Amino acid sequence: MLKINPLTRKRLNQMAVNVAILLVIVFAMIPIATTVLISFKREQDVIRKPPVIFPCDTPEKSFDLRACRWSTEGYYRVLAPKPSKTSPLGFVLTGNMLRTYLPNTLLYASVTAFIVVFLAGMSGYAFSRYHFRGYRALMTAILAITGVPLLTNLLALYQMGVILRKADLPFWDDRIFIVIVYIGFYLPLSVWIAKGFFDAIPRELEEAALIDGCTPLCALWRVIMPLAMPGLTAIFLLTFVNVWNEFIAAYLLIAKNEYKTAMYGLYDFLGQNIINVQVIAAACILIATPVVILFLFTRRTFFRAMVEGAVKG
Amino acid sequence: MQKTALPRSRKRRFQNTLPFWLILPTLIVLLVVQVYPALYTVWLSFHEREPKGWVYVGWGNFQRLFHQSLFHESIGHTIVFLVGYTVITMTAGFFIALLLNRKLRLSGLYITLLFIPWILADIIAGMVFRLLVIPDYGLLAGFLQNPAIFPPKGLSVLTAVPPHPWFGDFPFPPAPAMILLILASSWRALPFITLLLLAAMQTVPTEIIESSRIDGANGRQIIRHILIPLMLPTMVVALFSLTLTGVNSVGMIFSLTGGGPGTSTEVLSYLLYTIGWNQLRFGRAAALALMMAIVNWLLITGTLRLTRVEERSR
């Protein structure tokens, strides 16, 4: 048998593991990479038979870096810039995606996330610190609700939406409705995550504040909140991304086009651009980039919330 | 502070009921958005809309649903989907977690990169996979539609008819589009399951593994007799959570296959949409929703019981 120095062997082993993981990552990245490639192609290169991966072939050579025909046509068609005299940049972006759908998504996601953090913080704190009558029953009820899927409630919510729209309430529109629906759906899990984070904060800190003459609310606000901030940020991010990515409720519950979200816009693009897939690819990249960047900057917080949430249910 | 202006007894009462006030808003929201619609769904499932308004039909919706051949077909599709989705995701997740469980210098970077598919919306993930196989123009279409590789005519994933079923009407082997749907769903769920399994793997004390290695156990034996038994509770939780998301996820079908070709990717969640919003049979769709909610509820109580057993055994 070949004798290998144990140290070398260990290093070889490490290298093999690294290579294996890199292979997995490359494999997992292929769909994303191809989408990015497609989004930078011209229409003529997208509809070629057989398809080419890189639009870099010339009649003589199959790959020539200088002959690459990259283009931003897809993005151009999504954003639809038009020259304008009044705009300081000299043009305005007229695409529905950027003018209507993305701002709506941003609005719903941030408002929902703020309210969910606020409500989940309050009730998570109460569940963590007080063992009142009916405590266990309420906790279990909330946990049971955590599992109710948005999908099976959609029929009833749709009917409620129709009735509310007919009732013609002042100040009421689909935007308020969808935000309330989102709050209701992302709140239960957030309550659990918040409770977990509050449980990890020692009670002694709070008791000390109470002895020093702070009221319970003041202790909550001045002592606990700063310590709970990382946890609440995690809930905010998780809710934000969930709402950003949500499709079916936004698609079915919002009637007016001007209130619809980016995911709906994307689905709409799919119907309009059967051949021009570079437009779809560009729209995908535009919508996904903000949350991917958000995730890359806050991944630690994310993982903490996810593990906390997963352990609970 | 303003509070001191309150009479002492009122202040005392407010403080004693503080937890109630803290929870109240959450309860109201949950009652409005979760409990009321759930009860409304039950009501809907016993009614159907006629031109003159809602009419009570008793169990009629359920009966008609059971007689709908598409319903039986989608149960088959859902089972095929769930089995493929859970098996692929759990197996791949376990092996990737095994790789990541070594102390690697770059494992933080690896996990971050691996996690990107999870952060994408399901509808975007479906779109991304659709772009790969769009007939004639998708990047994989050149390979898949090559008659030399897939005789006799090459394979066009989004339009190929499902193969002839082997067991009666049960849709197995699945249509190519269903396989693509399974792969795309697994691709998106994999990061989460990997992280979950990795977290469980890291709680297994290294002493146990070291000592068994000294006792002469090889890698496969360690996995089989030490890692898997110790990780079993988490694996069951992961399996349940996969099943839950698998039963309820629908966004990807919209962008990937739209239920087609034909009805070959019409799973129960998409059938709910088809009956409710394409056929406009809200009562019947509510009956389906009710049954799906019961399945969900059983899965959740199962998970809860298991986690509780696990907590007790600690």
Image: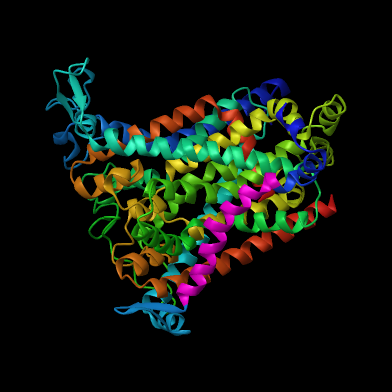
Residue at figure coordinates x 74%, y 59% from the top left:
A137
Q: Could you say which quadrant of the image residue B103 lies in?
A: top right
| Residue A70 belongs to magenta span | no
Residue A226 to residue B219: above or below: above
- For the rendered model, the colour scheme is rainbow
Would residue B75 be found to the left or right of residue A116 on screen?
left
Would residue A228 be found to the left or right of residue B311 on screen?
left
Residue at figure coordinates x 66%, y 35% from the top left:
B101
User: How many discs mark residues in the rendered view?
Assistant: 0
Taking depth in this image into account, of A271 and A249 the one nearest to the observer is A249
Taking depth in this image into account, of A103 and B187 the one nearest to the observer is A103
Give the residues drawn in magenta, as a range. B21-45
List x then y, in percent, for residue B288. 46, 72
| Residue found at the very far top of the displayed protein | A88
Taking depth in this image into account, of A283 and B266 the one nearest to the observer is A283
Q: Could you say which quadrant of the image residue B14 lies in?
A: top right
Residue B141 appears in the rendering? no
Residue A302 appears in the rendering? yes
List x then y, in percent, for residue A131. 81, 49
Residue A48 to residue B65: above or below: above
Quadrant placement of the N terminus of chain B: top right
List x then y, in percent, for residue B312. 83, 54
Would residue B40 be found to the left or right of residue B176 on screen?
right
Q: Main secondary structure of the magenta part?
A: helix
| Residue found at the very far left of the displayed protein | A59
List x then y, in percent, for residue B174. 40, 64
